[in-house]
Amino acid sequence: MKHGLTRKFVGAFALVVLLSVLILNFFVGLRLKNYFEVKTAERLRSNAILISNILRDDMAARDRQAIQEMTAELARSLEVRITIIGSDGRVMADTAQIPGEMDNHSERLEMKRAMHGGTGESIRYSDTLQYSMKYVAVAVESGGTVVGFVRLALSLEDLEQQIQVIYRTVLIGGLVAFVCVLVVGTIITRGIITPITEMTEVAQAISRGDFSKRLKVKSTDELGVLAQSLNSMADELRLTIDDLRRMDKVRTDFVANVSHELKTPLTSIRGFIETLEDGALEDKANARRFLAIIKKHANALSNITDDLLRLSELESVEARIERAPFDLRALVEEVASGFALALEEKGQELVKSLKGDDFTVEADRQRMEQVMLNLVDNAINYSPAGSRIRVAVELADGVFKISVEDNGPGISREHLSRVFERFYSVDKARSREVGGTGLGLSIVKHTVLMHKGEISMDSKLGRGTTVSFTLPKS
Ligand SMILES: Nc1ncnc2c1ncn2[C@@H]1O[C@H](COP(=O)(O)OP(=O)(O)OP(=O)(O)O)[C@@H](O)[C@H]1O
Ligand SMILES: [Mg+2]
């Protein structure tokens, strides 16, 4: 996959660059060749004019000796073939051949043109030199008459070679550019493809349900933003999945707990009913005892179902609290007197500490009563005989702080964080003994939270436990 895209990109790059280089080369080469040819012709012409100026007097005087010496010297420095021709077409000097052995030149095309217009050019195969030449001839005038011609010739082979050099240079330049573009193009493409490949891997991992992979965000460009989004999507998905799993576990645990809590008293009830059926019914005294036990378990069942109903009602979306002003002090007194008998039986003492004079609060009285009953019930149940329980209420900044404190056995740290969970009890056997199901504190917590209050539990092993919660005055 990785190589697929890189190859496609670089292939396309290469094709475009190669085409550009070839087209550029073609036009630049053509233009340069043309320019070179024009320049060469111009150079030959200006050199011919220069030479004619130098030789004008000698040509007028027909001084062959002087003309030949000068011509040879000039040809060396100019690197062209120079031919000096008389006005009659006879060759007076030539740097390639002996003038005496050469034909009359008046019929040569460039000469004819020069005779008519002063300058003439032609390209022709030279029999003498055996290759194509470029010829440029200019007429030399002295005192109003043509005294002869200066003709320069350059081998086209040289010209061709020089053009080839130019072509090759341009081509090499183009190829170097091509290679550079390929290298740079590959690097750039890799820079884009690599992050995409990494993102694909993460996305594939997510689709497999693996949310652990994360991308390194290296840039702030579109790819960086995309990587960032993928990361937060993975985070979000992981949280959601974790939540769903936890909720699912809570649900299955809950069902298991409910079943278990219901099963214990039911088993017991069935056992005693069977005993009665098997004959115990005749034994009046025992029968009454068994019936009392059955009644106790039936009550426990009814307590559990009541608690469950209350809890599901609190948890339901439509759960409503009926706020109305009532006196918190009166509620505390009521709850305390309700427990008077239980306290007396265990030889425990309940101390009330209510500071201030305004105890009017706007809340759901019935539910708050439930909360207080649960907390005092726990304090009585889990503390030993003869202990002391303290209920305190104080108002600060429009918020009541209510606490129930005991000097019972306390709760260890590991259990403390879990006692608000449904069905959680520190000591199952002990809880069952006192008739608890572990729902009390979760109902308390829900109720307090619904009143926009906060709840906490503070406990020291062997010292005692304090449950405190807040309740906004209105
Ligand atoms: N004041 C306390 N001192 C020591 N342990 C306590 C105290 N209050 C609660 N606990 C522990 O926390 C557990 C949970 O309490 P919670 O009130 O939720 O359930 P419960 O009392 O067992 O049953 P329920 O209140 O539903 O009848 C209890 O089982 C008990 O082990
Ligand atoms: Mg309880």
Image (tube, rainbow, N blue to C red):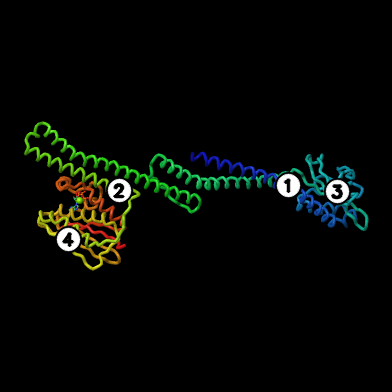
Q: CA distance from mark 4 to mark 2?
A: 30 Å
Q: Which residue is mark 2?
A: 313
Q: Which residue is mark 4?
A: 390
Where is mark 1, residue-wise? Answer: 33
Is the distance from the Cβ of mark 3 to the nearest ligand 1 atom less than 8 Å? no
Residue type at tag 1:
Lys
Residue drawn 22% across and 45% down? 304
Q: Nearer the viewer, mark 2 or mark 3?
A: 2
Q: CA distance from mark 2 to mark 3?
A: 116 Å
Labels 4, 1: front one: 4
Question: Which sits in the foreground, 214 or 139?
Answer: 214
Query: Which is nearer the N-term, disc 4 or disc 2?
Result: 2
Task: Please name the amino acid that badge 4 sits on.
Answer: Arg
Q: Nearer the viewer, mark 1 or mark 2?
A: 2
Point out the frontmost of discs 4 and 3. Answer: 4
- Would you name the residue on which mark 3 appears? 120
Q: Residue at x 44, y 47 (%)?
A: 230
The quarter of the picture where residue 96 lies is: top right
Q: Is residue 393 above or below residue 114?
A: below
Q: Residues within 10 Å of mark 3 (few under 14, many from 20)?
A: many
Which mark is on residue 210?
none
Q: CA distance from mark 4 to mark 3?
A: 131 Å
Q: Residues within 10 Å of mark 2 (few under 14, many from 20)?
A: few
Q: What residue type is disc 3 on?
A: Gly
* Image quarter hosting the C terminus: bottom left
Q: Earlier in the sequence, mark 2 or mark 3?
A: 3
Instruction: Indicate if the residue with disc 1 has its beta carbon within 8 Å of ligand 1.
Output: no
For numbered disc 3, what is the local secondary structure? strand
Give the residue type at disc 2. Glu
